[in-house]
Amino acid sequence: MPPRPESADPVIRLEDAVVAYREDMALQEVSLTVYRGEWLGILGPNGAGKTTLLTVVNGLGRLLRGRAFVFGREITRGCPASLRRRIGYVPQVQRIDPRMPISVREVVRLGACGRVGLFRRPRPADERLVDFWIDRVGIGPLSGRPIGHLSGGEQQRAAIARALVQQPEILLLDEPTTGLDRTSRVEILDLVRDVHRERAMTTLMVTHAHRRAAALCDRVVLMKEGRIWGEGPAAAMLQAETLNRLYDPEGEQG
Amino acid sequence: MDLSIWGYGFMQNAVLAGAFGGAACAAVGVLVVTMQLSFLGVAIAHAAFAGALLATILGVPPAVGSLAFSLAAVAAVGPLADRGEFSPDAPIGIVFSLTLGLAFLFMGLLPGPRTEGLDLLWGSLLTVSRADVALLAGVAFAVGLLVLLFFKEIQAVIFHRELALAVGMPAQPIYYGLLIAVGLVITASLPSIGGLLVFTLILNPAAAAYQLTYSLRHMFLIAVAFGVASTWAGLVGSWLFRLPSGATIVLVSTAIFIAAAAGSPKRRGKAR
């Protein structure tokens, strides 16, 4: 059940957020509130500003205009490290140099390193957490392997484990199922759904075109050309006719 | 074999300078190679050389000029490589050719027989002073301490700077701290190892170690061993066969790299 706005606690609030990369306006006056415990799906064609929206929340993207609040704190001028530690981020799968000298376990352990802080080593409790999530995402036998040797799906699982080792209150997922086979897609979505519920996280998930993924969400935001084009419960937003208009390059703007 | 040479002070200095310089260059080389910023390292090395020449002309200690110029190079090219939106090849290339041009200019302006300038270019392990050795030792220990204290941050920044930032690490200060460490090592290495050779010692041992291991910890250790071995082989070569030590160091470290690349388990992995 989606939480009711009037009774719920807003953990993310954007007010007229504008982000630009050089000449391109990536986000144009986007206003959005996300409530604690909500699972928000973000859909839209390429270049709609979906990834930029996620990066505004964790401070990797900088606002040109407008304001942003996370956990009630203004992050308009960047998200401080103390808040970033509470936000897990799984970026889109990127090619990793197969010779990169870092193991799967070391990558997952990075999730604990922000919290551990400078001049300290991860404690045994952190190491247990790393082992727990490596097993939970199903890459236990691969933990000693170089990260660059894993398949895209396996790297994606490692990235999710790393984000969860952070014990985040907000989880940002950028196309977590793109490029995966059907079995992996279903497994990863099931995992995210279970963890989202168990940990009472606030989850923002960008998906390019997967209606099945978006259907799991409490609420769906449709984006196009840097603007929010539509917003509402998943069932209402995922009508074939609505999506056809969203993905139609000639389609009118909302 | 005549080993009486080791009794001489200049040879002891050379051996120590080779060890500390080789180790420090190899350690920062691991950073440069794994962050795929090799070209940035070349730009910093040439800037340091140009700065040392300008300092010599102005009559101030060369280290002052090379430090200032290498930090300026870090300030100029660091943000370009960091932005990630476009390939930084061209801007780094421009900084690189600018520093090379400045080095030529200052070399031309240098009065007299220009031996000081040529010494900075080629370095001279055999005439290195106690003070230079002490500086190299200090920088080598500082780099070692930096790597030990910030190992997990370094690992994170090497793997993915954006992710390091996202998990709540101070990724920007660490990134620039590492680039400044590269500049410091080059500055300290200039009198003994020289502006041309320093880059060989930064790149070759680290690139060889990169071929041989998937562990960053081991990569640091292997690179340092290769760096020290290269400088010492250069000294032995110059003593036994009267070869120029700088040239021998370049050839030995390149041979180590070729051997490592040929025997690399990573190469076999690719072929499978």
Image (tube, grey):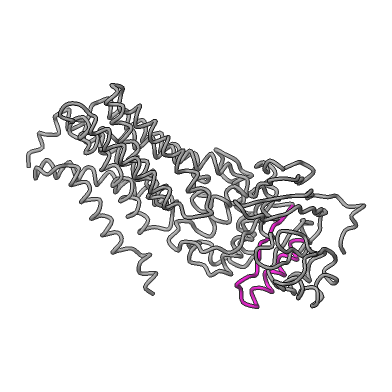
> In the displayed image of the protein, which residue is found farthest to the top?
B59
Of residue A230 and residue A203, the one placed in the foreground of this image is A230
Give the quarter of the image for residue A192. Answer: bottom right
Q: Kindly identify the residue that appears in the image at 75 percent across and 65 percent down.
A: A194
Residue A154 percent across, percent down from the top left: 57, 68
Of residue B62 and residue A212, the one placed in the foreground of this image is B62
Give the quarter of the image for residue A135. Answer: bottom right
Residue B72 percent across, percent down from the top left: 42, 35
Q: Which residues are magenta?
A: A170-196
Q: Kindly identify the residue that appears in the image at 39 percent across and 57 percent down.
A: B213
Of residue A73 and residue B116, the one placed in the foreground of this image is B116
Q: Magenta segment: does it hold B269?
A: no
Assign the N terminus of chain A to one quadrant of the image.
bottom right
Of residue B77 and residue A178, the one placed in the foreground of this image is B77
Residue A70 percent across, percent down from the top left: 76, 46
Compared across the picture, whether B32 is left or right of A136 comes to left
Compared across the picture, whether A206 is left or right of B111 comes to right
Circle count: 0
Q: Kindly identify the residue that appears in the image at 66 percent across and 73 percent down.
A: A185
> In the displayed image of the protein, which residue is found farthest to the left?
B2
Assign the C terminus of chain A to one quadrant of the image.
bottom right
Relative to A188, residue B120 above or below: above
Residue A97 percent across, percent down from the top left: 46, 61
Give the quarter of the image for residue A243. Answer: bottom right
Q: Kindly identify the residue that appears in the image at 72 percent across and 62 percent down.
A: A205
Compared across the picture, whether B159 is left or right of B125 comes to right
Q: Magenta segment: does it hold A173?
A: yes
